[in-house]
Image (cartoon, rainbow, N blue to C red):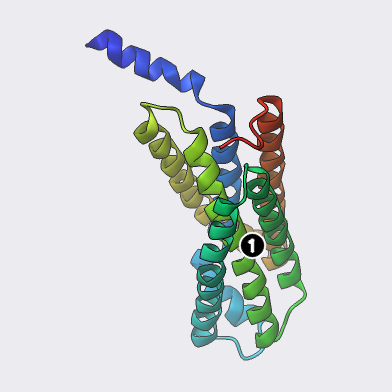
Amino acid sequence: MKKEVNADLFSLSKISMVIRFLVISDFFIWGSWGLIYPIFAIYITDNIQGGGLAVAGIAYGIFVFTRSLFQIPIAIFADKTKGEKDDFWFMLSGTCLLILTPILMIYIDHIWQLYAVQVIHGLGNAAIYPTRMAIFTRHIDKKHEGLEWGIFQTMMDISLAFSAFLGGFIVSSFGWNTLLITRSVLYFLGALFVLGIYRQMKKGKILFAR
């Protein structure tokens, strides 16, 4: 029995490189998310003319509604298109939109501008998550599905916990603009690991495989 457990633990070193890149990419992306959303209402109150708790709630609602509206059509299109090339490009383009949104937030000071940025943020998330999860599901290692989903979720939780602490520290020490730039940098790092996924797919000649 012990030998079997040891073999399962050793298999951690054999996890698909596509899965590894996805986990690391999402670690940075969720970290960027965690930097600001615990203090999102405070950001709006401090930086947006007429901003307050109601505006924060509406802004978050616009983000979630936009993501919900476009996720399923994107997922249906990706499922109907042969191969994973479309999944990859949706994922990369969505991540690029996420890189843009914190930079835009540096320059906004009106409520309507905030809402517009939230629409862009929602579109970015709608593009990346159905396609990201599809790729993860296809490349997950057989007999270790629970383990690899567990690793994924644990890494996301660690990222959110650490970034929530870090976000408060950055704002109190360096200000909101530094926080927003840090968010954009984390999204950029996430995008770099998306490119790593493309290299692995191309190397394994599985970019068009189902």
* Quarter in which the C terminus is drawn: top right
| Residue at image point 35% right, 35% down | 146
Which of the two residues, 169 or 59, is positioned nearer the viewer here?
A: 59
Which of the two residues, 46 or 140, is positioned nearer the viewer here?
A: 140
- Badge 1 local density, few (<14 within 10 Å), some, or many (20+)? many
Direction from residue 49 to residue 150 in the image, left or right: left
- Whole-percent x and y of residue 108? 74, 78
Check the image and name the residue furthest to the bottom.
Answer: 50
Q: Quadrant of residue 93?
A: bottom right
- Whole-percent x and y of residue 125? 59, 61
Check the image and name the residue furthest to the left.
Answer: 1
Q: Is residue 163 visible?
A: yes
| Residue at image point 36% right, 26% down | 143
| Above or below 89: residue 104 | below
What type is the residue that disc 1 sits on?
Gly
Q: Which residue is mark 1?
A: 124
- Whole-percent x and y of residue 48? 66, 83
Which of the two residues, 122 or 80, is positioned nearer the viewer here?
A: 80
* Quarter in which the N terminus is drawn: top left
Direction from residue 67 to residue 145 in the image, left or right: left
| Residue at image point 56% right, 48% down | 132
| Above or below 102: residue 45 | below
Direction from residue 150 to residue 90 in the image, left or right: right
